Amino acid sequence: MKILSTSLFFLIAGMFSAQSTQFIYEYKFKPDSLNRDQVITENMVLESKTDGSRFVSQKKITEDSLLNASIKQMMAGGGNHIDMSKTPQPKVRNEVVKKYPSYETTFKTSPGSVPIAVAISQKPDWKVSTEKSEVLGYKVQKATSRYAGREWTAWFAPEIPIQDGPHEFYGLPGLIVKIEDTKNDHSFVLIGTKKVSSDQAEQKPRMSSREIALDEEKFRKYWQDYKKDPVKDMRQEILSSSGGVVTSMTFNGKTYSKGEMIRDSEKSRKEMLKTENNYLNLNLYKP
């Protein structure tokens, strides 16, 4: 207990100093409601700073960094080809950003080629139980909620004084270190923590200047239109003169031309719509 208390002291101290704290979660989910034997695992990061948090895949952080570097290198050399063959591919591309202390929540996604920022209005409504347990050495307490079309069981650690948690979850008197829905379709479990110095500045997302802000109702309409033609925006961008900087891209060991990029993307996106339908936030994707 002495070792745990000392570690905890420095963890909490770092939250209010020149450092941010990264809480690393193992995320397990079943992407296809018709194939419940398939389970995907991805490590996710909740980076908590004094003004808010960002929840994102570890692999996406690496991918964004490498892609930004590749684009800078291409522009500096006057080329028109990007090689993404060695870039790790995240299974989860969505992000969630929260602002402190209001916990205003934004769900960031890119169904097509345009980044979307969805303002989430629904808030988790918790019922705190007296039941207690332990996760990663932390003493935790149980809470339940019906949120986003699912029933959830969460375990929070009062000794970590952050009312935050993975994805869109927050609002308990302590960090949510474990949460899963009753169907066991989606689960998050804290597996580690680490400090990040403030001089390791967070990179601005590559397409943040093009980000479209939508409320939940407008996103639902956008999603229904996207399902009808999932490469509409990509087709317009690639074939336009303004989108003509990149003429080819190497991906998964193959080099694609503009036309091939469009055709292959249309095929893969339509297949993805069939097999990735078990969304965490069911309310956001319903017709």
Image (tube, rainbow, N blue to C red):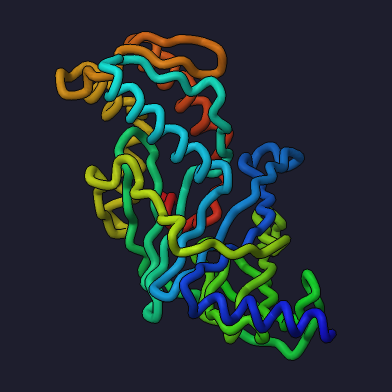
- Furthest-right residue in view? 1
Q: Residue sitting at 30 percent across and 15 percent down?
A: 80
Looking at the image, which is closer to me, 181 or 167? Answer: 167
3 or 91, nearer to the observer: 3
Where residue 8 sits: x, y (%)?
A: 69, 80
Q: Is residue 148 visible?
A: no
Which image quarter: residue 146?
A: bottom right
Q: Residue at x 69, y 68 (%)?
A: 178
Residue 249 in view in this figure: yes
The residue shown at (33%, 62%) is 119
Q: Quadrant of residue 216?
A: bottom left
When the figure is inspected, residue 274 is found, relative to residue 16, above or below; the finding is above
Q: Position of residue 229 (x, y in %)?
A: 33, 27
The quarter of the image holding the N terminus is: bottom right
Q: Quadrant of residue 33?
A: top right
Image position, residue 268 (x, y; %): 49, 23
Left or right: where 146 falls relative to 200: right
